[in-house]
Image: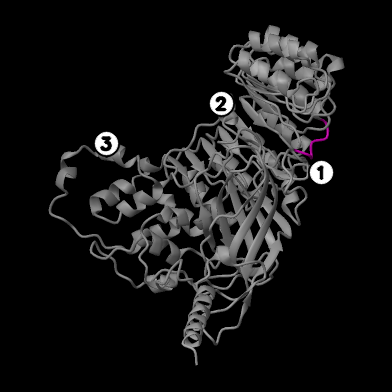
Amino acid sequence: MSPVFPMLTVLSMFYYMCLRRRARTATRGEMNSRRAIESNTRALPINVEIVQYAKEVLDFSSHYGSENSMSYTMWNLAGIPNVYPSSGDFTQTAVFRTYGTWWDRCPSARLPFKRTPSTFCSQDYVELAFEEPVYPTAVHILETYHPGAVVRILACSANPYSQNPPAEVRPFGKFGRAEDLRNVRLDSSRLLSWRQVSLSLTGGNLRWEILWSEAPTKVNGPQARQFTPCIKQINFPTNLIRLEVNSSLLDYYTELDAVVLHGVKERPVLSLKTSMIDMNDIDEDEDEEKYGCGMDTLNKQFSIVTLREWPTNGYFDKLPYELIQLILSHLTVPDLCRLAQTCKLLYQHCCDPLQYIHLSLQPYWARINDTSLEYLQSRCTLIQWLNLSWTGNRGAISVSGFSRFLKVCGSELVRLELSCGHFLNEACLEVITEMCPNLQELNLSSCDKIPPQAFNHIAKVGSLKRLILYRTKVEQTALLSILNFCSELQHLSLGSCVMIEDYDLIASMMGAKCKKLRSLDLWRCKNITESGIAELASGCQLLEELDLGWCPTLQSSTGCFTNLARKLPNLQKLFLTANRSVCDTDIEELAANCTHLRQLDILGTRMVSPASLRKLLESCKDLSLLDVSFCSQIDNRVVLELNASFPNVFIKKSFTQ
């Protein structure tokens, strides 16, 4: 036999072994749609990858579109792509409410909460349900316009289509359940890491796991792309995916077309390229905040930890109490909880109510429950700002748990953020109005589960200066009562409030009662007319910000926009989005009377010429944003000329490819 044949046989065997090893260690990126992946254990069945589009949109924080249509709404994320691979501005996509930093530079902008961890930068979210629970191997996000906003992808252990509660998920840490830790005695020589404690004691069976997370990125160009980040493997199947976005770096609205979930029915073995280490043996302390924080776990640890008494506290004994407090004020809440486990002196400082004057629990929304609030009560007796946005959903916070917390901690509250708090009901609003007599700011944005009659309770808080009711079911009667009794209002958001029947009557009440109003959001109100605008402009002459975007009943021919310009000289932001009747006369009146104007949106008008825009730009020296998208008389050549003459103004010209 020729010596060549044994050599070929050996090479063939070696090639076959390489193929088998590659199949065993294939990374997620190498797994094709519905491709059979052979396991490295012969007893395990062959896994077939399942590819599925989102079946339903379950929840979201905001969208550009109307509540009564499909254009630019989050509901467009369900099903197969409508636009991809095309690029451009299309109504069939999902679009969030804001972009860039413009909304942080207007009179209605709110001060940020301190101690927000650097790893949390999410501004909006959307939750998607899929048909079958799978172990995710890839998530494809089809972005069709200005990509780069997605910053986090999360998976939930709950099945939205199952009547049964989710089965208990054993975390990756060394300890499996909360019961396993109750008999663990801790001292300064044996303290659990934040990661272990957080995963071990998070309440209930519901669990969120971060598949991927990164800071927002600036993508060159608005073209469509398929975004497929490298996700981590998780130890439970899921058919509930959450996307979180940050649009602060974008030049315009991001548009999403569809989300594709790839996964397998059986739990895959970790590949050699990702890990050969048993995850149960890992003490993972780095990047712990990326995986969420269990406030209840830390507070439980406070109750069982034994701290060693030292003869001295070193240099801390030489520092004034106030200086130590100042140093600790720069720590995030998880860092405070970690530091409290070191010694009695720092435990005392970390639990001092003065450290919790301003408290934002939004970054830890996935881990907050009734137990968390219970253990925080003793520390929050002096709290003035509280952010519970996005928290408490799917039963994590009960009405009784929220009420108990406010009864102890609500007396000094000045600012309360409850955006997307779907646990809220009429009883909660009643408790807020009774227990928070000093409340000045209340944010109920996208709390669309609150019944209409519940909003009547808000009228009892006469000290309110800011009220955000975006995407709520507030009715006309309740709103009239609020405006009548809350005469100190300075900022009011009624965007997408579809239950209000007569906006002219609302505007008339504002003009009569809300003389201090500085900002007003009437985004997509369907029935305000020139009569309501006249009443508003006559009575609320301190207005600096007015959003009348997508208000189809306003016509320039009635003189409503001219009247606004003449009566409201302090205007800094004016949105007349999608009003095709805006004309040169309106722009010239703004140039003559509203010289402090900073932001103007006249998207969609057909009657504004380049000459009137030039007058506006010459008169309004502080103008920084001018949106002339889909303005038929303003082509790209005109935009280039205006940009050259006024380089400090961001002139946006959008078009559909």
Q: Which mark is residue 105?
A: 2
Question: Which three-letter amino acid code belongs to the residue tagged 2?
Answer: Arg
Image coordinates for residue 316, horizontal then vertical, percent: 19, 44
Q: Is residue 10 left or right of residue 329?
A: right
Observer-side mark, 2 or 3, equals 2
Nearest the eye: 272 or 234: 272
Q: Residue furthest right?
A: 557
- Residue 500 located within the stretch drawn in magenta: yes
Q: Secondary structure at mark 3?
A: helix
Based on the picture, tell me whether residue 14 belongs to the magenta stretch.
no
Question: In the image, which disc is placed on residue 69?
Answer: 1
Distance of label 2 from label 3 (alpha carbons): 34 Å
Q: Image point 25% across, 36% down: which residue?
A: 323
Foreground mark, 3 or 1, reads: 1
Mark 1 closeness class: few <14, some 14–19, many ≥20 residues within 10 Å: few
Q: Magenta-highlighted stretch: main secondary structure?
A: loop
Type of residue at label 1? Ser
**Residue marked by disc 3:** 322
